[in-house]
């Protein structure tokens, strides 16, 4: 699950923190420049053999400003974006800055930290993200982390399944050994293709390398999708004991309650989740409680506040209310803005009310889903 998505909740897990930090791989704010010179006077982190750093002092300072400014709110993201744009303007061959800019633009649509004012700006930001990552990789082609970033953007927002897998393969070929982050992305790709058993295997590989990577939480979601609620609950509760306020953990546990016939418990659990998780889960719980009016009221709030960044979840709400036409309208909107949560469409149990509709197969075709026939059955 990506950081900032509705199903990862933008959580402050170690994996999410490491990815935020990886936007600035060769520099950290507060360090003196000579710590990055590697024996080459007046070159700020410049290593031509690796394609890293810059020989332009002003570009380097702009990069550092971006690292210092970057926060999880809109103002911090916009300031960091402007600083990175200045860095690449000052040095068009500054690979680190291009990669950081691509990462920031690609993540710019998540609730809780978005600089996109509407769906059009969101889609444009993601196109720019791909262009920036392409440029950075062309300048520094031997850095595996760059391919991991581009794979994520390709998969989440452009539904480029083959390109995403090719980037993962390239990243792995450049690594001395696989990492938890690599396996997490392979798990996500396998799950989104409908191969949940393969996803569970990658989840286990990731957690073996780094138990705090978030892979166990993701495994819980994959178990829910398989209908193995008891196993999912047991795993998620172990994670919850360590991180009781993590949004997605509370959301997934609430889903376990729902599927086990405990809507009141689910409501209480969803109250501990982040805003989009909370509103989405509350809609579903009210449906299961037999209170469609309360569900519609909550869904209206979700639409009003997150129309451009949670179209997929809004579609789920309408689907559960039996409002099929509205659900497909919101799925269309999700595709238009490049909603990354659509990658769950092929296996998402929450989309069960739509799965037998002919239009469901059409939506799968629009995102070039590789297992359309199986997912639509």
Image (cartoon, rainbow, N blue to C red):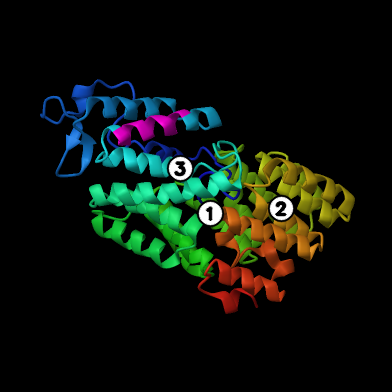
Q: Provide the residue designation for mark 1.
A: 218
> Which is closer to the viewer, label 3 or label 2?
3
Identify which residue is drawn at 24% across, 41% down.
Answer: 93
Left of 138 or right of it: where is 181?
right
Identity of the residue drawn at 69% across and 72% down: 359
The residue to which callout 3 is attached is 105
Foreground tag (2 vs 1): 2
Mark before the other along the chain sequence, 3 or 2: 3
- Mark 2 residue crowding within 10 angstroms, few (<14) / some (14–19) / many (20+): many
Q: Quadrant of residue 62?
A: top left
For the residues bearing labels 3 and 2, Cβ distance under 8 angstroms: no
Q: Is residue 261 above or below residue 347?
A: above
Residue designated by label 2 = 314
Q: Nearer the viewer, residue 156 or 210?
A: 156
Alpha-carbon span between mark 3 and mark 2: 24 Å
Q: Counting residues from the N terminus, which is met first, the one under dot 2 or under dot 1? A: 1
Label 3: few (<14), some (14–19) or many (≥20) C-alpha neighbours in 10 Å: many
In percent of the image, x 50 and y 73: which residue is there? Answer: 370
Question: Which region is colored magenta?
Answer: 79-89
Q: CA distance from mark 2 to mark 1?
A: 22 Å
Few, some or many residues within 10 Å of mark 1 (<14, 14–19, 20+): many
**Is residue 37 at all visible to an observer of this figure?**
yes
Magenta region, mostly helix, strand or loop? helix
Instruction: Confirm or deny contact between disc 1 and disc 3 (CB under 8 A).
Output: no
């Amino acid at each position: 699950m990506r950081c900032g998505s509705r199903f990862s909740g933008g959580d402050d897990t170690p994996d999410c923190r490491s990815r935020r930090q990886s936007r600035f791989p060769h520099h950290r704010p507060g360090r003196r420049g000579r710590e990055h010179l590697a024996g080459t006077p007046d070159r700020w982190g410049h290593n031509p053999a690796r394609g890293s750093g810059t020989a332009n002092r002003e570009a380097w300072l702009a990069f550092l400003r971006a690292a210092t400014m970057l926060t999880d709110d809109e103002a911090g993201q916009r300031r960091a974006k402007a600083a990175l744009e200045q860095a690449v303007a000052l040095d068009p061959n500054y690979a680190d800055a291009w990669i950081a800019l691509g990462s920031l633009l690609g993540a710019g649509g998540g609730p809780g930290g978005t600089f996109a004012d509407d769906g059009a700006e969101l889609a444009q930001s993601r196109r720019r993200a791909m262009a920036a990552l392409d440029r950075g990789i062309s300048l520094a082609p031997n850095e595996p982390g760059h391919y991991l970033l581009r794979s994520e953007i390709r998969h989440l927002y452009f539904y480029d399944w083959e390109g995403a897998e090719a980037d993962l393969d390239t990243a792995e070929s450049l690594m001395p050994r696989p990492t938890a982050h690599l396996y997490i992305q392979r798990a996500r790709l396998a799950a989104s293709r409908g191969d949940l058993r393969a996803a569970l295997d990658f989840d286990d590989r990731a957690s073996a390398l780094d138990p705090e990577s978030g892979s166990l939480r993701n495994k819980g979601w994959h178990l829910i999708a398989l209908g193995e609620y008891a196993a999912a609950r047991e795993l998620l509760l172990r994670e919850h004991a360590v991180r009781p306020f993590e949004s997605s953990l509370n959301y997934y546990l609430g889903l376990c309650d729902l599927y086990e016939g405990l809507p009141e418990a689910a409501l209480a659990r969803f109250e501990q989740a982040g805003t989009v998780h909370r509103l989405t889960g509350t809609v579903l719980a009210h449906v299961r409680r037999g209170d469609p009016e309360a569900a519609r009221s909550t869904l209206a709030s979700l639409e009003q506040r997150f129309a451009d960044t949670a179209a997929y979840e809004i579609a789920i709400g309408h689907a559960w209310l039996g409002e099929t036409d509205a659900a497909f309208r919101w799925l269309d909107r999700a595709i238009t803005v490049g909603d990354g949560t659509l990658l769950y469409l092929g296996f998402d149990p929450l989309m069960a009310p739509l799965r037998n509709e002919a239009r469901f197969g059409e939506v799968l075709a629009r995102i070039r889903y590789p297992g359309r026939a199986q997912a639509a059955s």
